[in-house]
Structure formats: C-alpha cells, structure tokens
Amino acid sequence: MITIGSLDRRILVQRMDTADLDAMGGFIQNFSNWDFFFANIEWTNTSLKETEDKTFATQTVNFIIRNVSDNAMKINSGDNYRIAYPLTDDTVDANTQYYTIVGTQIMPGRNTFKKIITKLESRGLPQK
C-alpha cells in the first residue's frame, strides 16, 4: 500500500508545446515545464537489444503520484507529456533524464494515487 510518506522524490512533468520539422526533415518536439509532483519510483523491467554494432536498452519505470490535483488528473499517455527526473533544486540539469509516458493507472483506494508508466530508452550505444 502506498502512503504519502513514500512519495519522497521530486519530479517535473513537462508538456509538449509544439512539434516542428528541422531543415533535414527530422521531427523536433518542444517541451515546457508544466507541474512538479512528489513521487514514489518503481524500477521494473529492463530489456536489451543488440545489433551488429549497437546496443539498444529500455528501462520501464513507474512513477506513483497523488491523484488529487487537476493537473495530476490530466496526465495521460496520449497528450504528449514526459517526466524529467532527477532534478537539482527543482531545475533540469545535465544529469536529468526524460521518461516517455506510455500509460497511466489509477491505484485502488478512493482514486487518490496514480501510477504513471514510463519508458527510458537509450538510442543505439556503440558496442565496445
């Protein structure tokens, strides 16, 4: 059972403002800071895929937040939100990673907690 005391990590939810194409036709997403939450973090599945010269890794991470504010209730996988974590003094820095939201789930018990299911993906790390 989740308790408020276990929500001990500060996360930032960002929302996509615009999506553009660069000069080469690549897709660029522009995110802005949307809201801060205290969360409990569950590190779950990890998968690894290797090609001839690259390794692709995916980590599934669940962030559990209180589902009591209007902003918390709006977070879902279809509206282009992402989570920035870890933060330094509520600021994104070089150590911050971005987690893509792939689903949400309301936790049992009067709908006061929401599980945000995310993926953290590496993009083709060269093999040694």
Image (cartoon, rainbow, N blue to C red):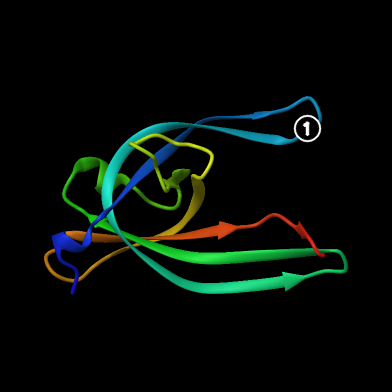
Report the residue that reaches farthest toward the top.
Answer: 23
Placement of the N terminus among the 4 image quadrants: bottom left
Near mark 1 (Cα within 10 A), the count class, few <14, some 14-19 or many ≥20, is few
Q: Is residue 4 above or below residue 26?
A: below
The residue that appears at 48% across and 43% down in the rendered structure is 80
The residue that appears at 73% across and 27% down in the rendered structure is 22
In which quadrant of the rendered view does residue 7 lie? Answer: bottom left
Q: Is residue 64 above or below residue 51?
A: above
State left or right for residue 37 relative to residue 42.
left
Q: Is residue 9 above or below residue 48?
A: above
The residue that appears at 68% across and 36% down in the rendered structure is 27
Placement of the C terminus among the 4 image quadrants: bottom right
In which quadrant of the rendered view does residue 13 lie? Answer: top left
Q: Which residue is mark 1?
A: 25
Q: Secondary structure at mark 1?
A: loop
State left or right for residue 91 relative to residue 49.
left
In which quadrant of the rendered view does residue 52 lie? Answer: bottom right
Residue 87 coordinates in the image, percent (x, y): 39, 42
Residue 39 coordinates in the image, percent (x, y): 28, 55
Work out whether residue 73 or residue 113 is closer to the camera in this orientation and state it. 113
Residue 14 coordinates in the image, percent (x, y): 42, 38
Give the residue type at disc 1.
Gly
Report the residue that reaches farthest toward the right.
Answer: 52
State left or right for residue 54 relative to residue 15.
right
Residue 23 coordinates in the image, percent (x, y): 79, 25
Q: How many marks?
A: 1
